[in-house]
Amino acid sequence: MHKSDTKRVLVVDDEKDTCEILESKLTDVGFSVTCAHDGAEGLEKIVTDKPDLVILDILMPGTSGLDLLRAYGEQATPGGPHFIVVTNMDAMEAMSAVFSHKVTDVRSKADTTVEEIVGLVKERLGA
């Protein structure tokens, strides 16, 4: 199976347009991409799909990105996914909120292009 070495990315964002755009762009460069639209669904997909990297929104109705990080942190295993947080929260506020979790990057949605996110994913996953 040649798909086994394909890096898996999970996008967790309540904005369906954001998910669709990132899924399209990341698939175009060779990643296997799935989407979740809230933190609860995202956590479930982290456990079942075992992505290599998670692009995570913080501000979502219901289970937030921070809730997901807290819940995942309680059951995390070594070698779990990288997390890239892309949020409308103030960057400094988001940094302090996620600092203790396995978050490698925090970006502001307003100041970050899809191309920059794709580049960051490629960099983090060595692709």
Image (tube, rainbow, N blue to C red):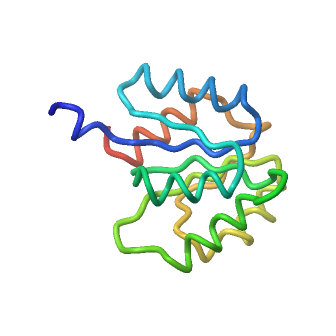
Q: Quadrant of residue 112?
A: top right
Q: Residue 74 in the image: x percent, y percent?
A: 55, 80
Quarter that holds the N terminus = top left
Image vertical order of residue 93 relative to residue 36, above or below: below
Residue drawn at 47 percent across, 28 percent down:
26
Q: Outermost residue toward the left?
A: 1
Q: Residue 106 in the image: x percent, y percent?
A: 65, 54
Image vertical order of residue 122 relative to residue 96, above or below: above
Q: Nearer the viewer, residue 48 or 90?
A: 48
- From the viewer's perspective, tell me whether residue 15 is left or right of residue 4: right
Q: Residue 31 in the image: x percent, y percent?
A: 39, 32
Q: Residue 65 in the image: x percent, y percent?
A: 71, 58
Q: Nearer the viewer, residue 15 or 95?
A: 15
Residue drawn at 82 percent across, 47 percent down:
88
Residue drawn at 75 percent across, 62 percent down:
94
Q: Nearer the viewer, residue 43 or 95?
A: 43
- From the viewer's perspective, tell me whether residue 5 is left or right of residue 92: left
Q: How many marks?
A: 0
- From the viewer's perspective, tell me whether residue 101 is left or right of residue 2: right
Residue drawn at 41 percent across, 48 percent down:
124
Image vertical order of residue 82 relative to residue 23, above or below: below
Quarter that holds the C terminus = top left
